[in-house]
Amino acid sequence: MGKNKLAKFAELETFTNVFQVKSGVLLGGEGFELKGKWNEQYFQNPNPIVLELGCGKGEYTVELARRFPDKNYIGVDIKGARIWSGAKDAFVNQLKNVAFIRTNIEMIFHFFAPGEVSEIWLTFPDPQMKKTTKRLTATNFIRSYLQFLKPSGIVHLKTDSNFMFTYTCEMVKLNDFEVLSHVDDIYAGENEKNPVLGIKTYYEQQWLDRGLTIKYIAFRPAAGKVLIEPEINIEPDIYRSFKRFRRQQ
């Protein structure tokens, strides 16, 4: 492990806006101290809580917090070296409506009480074309989200992957979820002016520079029903990384 990464891990421990809990602690039944108490004890306001799962460097989390100070934002990722970037930005600039959790997304329901979260953002998740249960919009993940989403809670997906977008739209349709927005190209026409969708991360700009369109869907998953997994054939994406994409040009 490089010295730079070790330094980031060490600094991460000093940030009061970052929470790192070992899986063994959660599975051992001790529970997370802020579960059900995020508004009262951490944010100290009654504003809605919004998660970004798989937040990477936290660019989207931090920019959403800047643009919408009337909401509280929490970025979640397992990679500490990635979280460090957004956490430091928020810490140095004293953004009080931002926090980060370092954990596996499969464990996220341990951190929030029923109805504690208003929205979930999934920004450019790995489409997991060969592993359905690893997709962040698969029904097993939706069931997990429903454990802590409000009854009117919203899930947002922003993706460059046609595979991921097609799969998610089919899953939403099959389970009769309410669709709030469906955009095939967010940078076409009036969509580009949307203050939420117009946030561009470093990697998103790279996809755009390669001529890919960015797609978006927002929906309300419904609780209290048996969720159905789509059984459809979807044409795979022809790329999975920048390196592979360049080889095909």
Image (spheres, grey):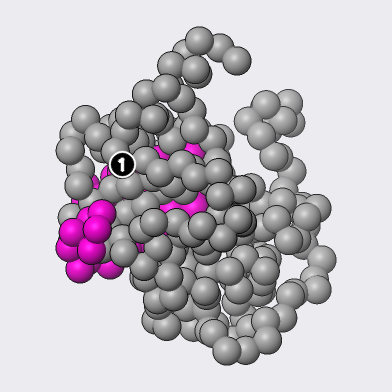
Rendered residue at 31%/60% (across/down): 38
Up/down of 167 relative to 86, above or below = below
How packed mark 1 is, by other alpha carbons closer than 10 Å (few <14, some 14-19, many 20 or more), is many
Say which of 184 and 11 sits in front.
11
Rendered residue at 28%/48% (across/down): 98
Residue at the spot of label 1? 17
Residue 247 forms part of the magenta stretch? no
Residue 17 visible in rendering = yes
Q: Position of residue 36 (x, y in %)?
A: 36, 67
Residue 52 forms part of the magenta stretch? yes
**Horizontal side, residue 160 vs residue 34: left or right:** right
Query: In terms of image quadrants, where is residue 169?
Result: bottom right
SS assignment at label 1: loop
Name, please, the residue furthest toward the bottom: 224
Name, please, the residue furthest toward the top: 3
Query: In terms of image quadrants, where is residue 15?
Result: top left
Query: For the C terminus, which image quadrant?
Result: top right
**Horizontal side, residue 93 vs residue 177: left or right:** left
Rendered residue at 70%/56% (across/down): 134
Which amino acid does the dot numbered 1 rest on? Answer: Asn
Q: Position of residue 88 (x, y in %)?
A: 31, 30
Tell me the magenta residue range: 40-67
Query: In terms of image quadrants, where is residue 135?
Result: bottom right
Query: For the N terminus, which image quadrant?
Result: top right
Q: Position of residue 56 (x, y in %)?
A: 48, 39
Up/down of 17 relative to 175, above or below = above
Residue 200 visible in rendering = no
Rendered residue at 43%/16% (across/down): 7
